[in-house]
Image: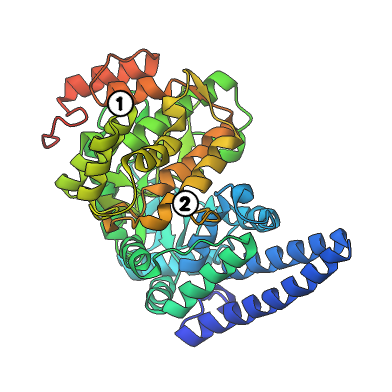
Amino acid sequence: MAGNEDQVPQGRIRRTMPLAGFTARAAGGRMVAALREKTGDTRAVARFHERTAARYSELLGHSKGVLMKAGQVLSMVDASAIGSGDFSPYQKALARLQADAPPMHPALAKEVMQADLGRSVDELFAEFAEEPMAAASIGQVHRAVLHDGRQVAVKIQYPGAAEAIRDDLANTELLATFFRFATSAAGTAMQPNLRQMTREIAARISEEIDYRHEAANITAFGQLYRDHPFIQIPDVVYEASGDRVLTMTYLDGMDWAAAQQADQDLKNNWAEAILRFGTGSWRHANLFQADPHPGNYCFGLDGRVGFVDFGCVKVLPECQRRRQVGMVRAAVDGRQHDLRDLMVETGYFASDSTLTADEAYQWMAGLLYEVLAPQPVSFTQDASQRAIRALIDLRSPDHPVRRMSAPDDFVFFPRLNLIMNPLFATLGATIYARSIMDDMDGVAEPITPLGKQHDAWVRQRGLPYGLDLHDHP
């Protein structure tokens, strides 16, 4: 029997108080650090932020719930563009949550499988690796071999994680505390619409703890990308899956750390594949994979990319999908008034808003900078900082986002910029971003080798392009 250290703390008070208390102590320490900064004791200030960041990362790592997931997302944001710049130590500490989440004991993992599937590990698998290959915010993943010889990955949910996450989602003070800490550490004046944001985030995270729902998502994406030349989706092994166990075929490839050391041409191919997947699924269908995290990718030496986590998926209403594609296309084509009209229809702001067509265009053009720049374009850290400034860095009182409100259906869309931009920058990727956008919208022929492969696959499958709206097969 595994020890109590593997159990997730439950209950609103138990999960709120450590974080709230720590945040209060951090705020007090920040005041001391600020005073020392005025006296020129910069080393003391740096030590304060390093210690605080390390403790906060540890606290989130043991939460195994909404807060840890929020920490993982925050760790991928290049926050050097926000506020005072004090966030750097926090980002480095939180980055450890991407791969170093504390795992549960092997005996406990086997107990979860037995309870969920009604069969022992030996009955389910010919081989099962007790050491997890990955540990994340909700569950951990083990490699295994089925009795028919297939290599599989087995995701096992932490005991109590679902209950703890439901408590987290119902505990508005817990989420507010996290946001207060993030904004305080960054020194930014961002004022998100917490009520609206929390509603949509809660809906997606609630789905993530439902492994049967994720299995259905994997199957939907697998059908959409069937026989794709460079986008791989695993197959669900339904006979070894349940409410808290999800088994899928194993996709071989390098992890994120190894991928960063690869040949540059290979990294460019991976970036194009990720961009086509991230922006293509809602062009060819109504599916949006809302967790573009590199820990969810398998990087193949043949240029293929495998996508292995589909807990956070948004199914876009058709009218909103049409408007989203239309907004991007209007911005790329420079049709400022059409862009503003579509943003009004989508719900970003009212028709009588003081936001002008030029302001709306300049904001969108900032998000599409790499598409509008001379091609091919190389992603640098500037790309990350532009996304931050456009979406969440609200130091300027005239920032356009102060007069916008993201519609519920698009709360997760900024993650494409906030996470994919730094991902591509880390890869040092150079790609034909405009050509990729144009050929996926069906307004131009592809010019890249991957684009030509993708185009042939789309035509063979009979999938729609851009605004050519038909249901996918």
In this view of the protein, can residue 424 be seen by the observer? Answer: yes
Disc 2 from disc 1: Cα separation: 23 Å
Q: Residue at x 74, y 63 (%)?
A: 49
Q: Please tell me whether residue 267 is drawn above or below residue 239 in the rendered image.
A: above
Near-viewer residue (321 or 193): 193
Name the residue that disc number 1 marks.
333
Measured as percent of width and height from the top left, residue 406 is found at 33, 55
Left or right of residue 319, residue 57 in this image: right
Measured as percent of width and height from the top left, residue 410 is found at 31, 52
Q: Residue at x 22, y 34 (%)?
A: 284
Q: Residue at x 60, y 36 (%)?
A: 381
Q: What amino acid type is highlighted by mark number 2?
A: His
Answer with the quarter of the image where residue 249 lies.
Answer: top left
Near-viewer residue (447 or 69): 447
Residue closest to the far bottom = 13
Left or right of residue 106, residue 280 in this image: left
Q: Please tell me whether residue 262 is drawn above or below residue 415 in the rendered image.
A: above
Q: Which mark is residue 182?
A: none
Kind of element beneath mark 1: helix
Name the residue that disc number 2 marks.
399
Q: Residue at x 69, y 79 (%)?
A: 25
Characterize the local packing of mark 2: few (<14), some (14-19) or many (20 or more) Cα atoms within 10 angstroms: some
Kind of element beneath mark 2: loop
C-beta proximity under 8 Å, tags 2 and 1: no
Left or right of residue 57, residue 241 in this image: left
Q: Earlier in the sequence, mark 2 or mark 1?
A: 1
Q: What amino acid type is highlighted by mark number 1?
A: Asp
Measured as percent of width and height from the top left, residue 274 is found at 42, 33
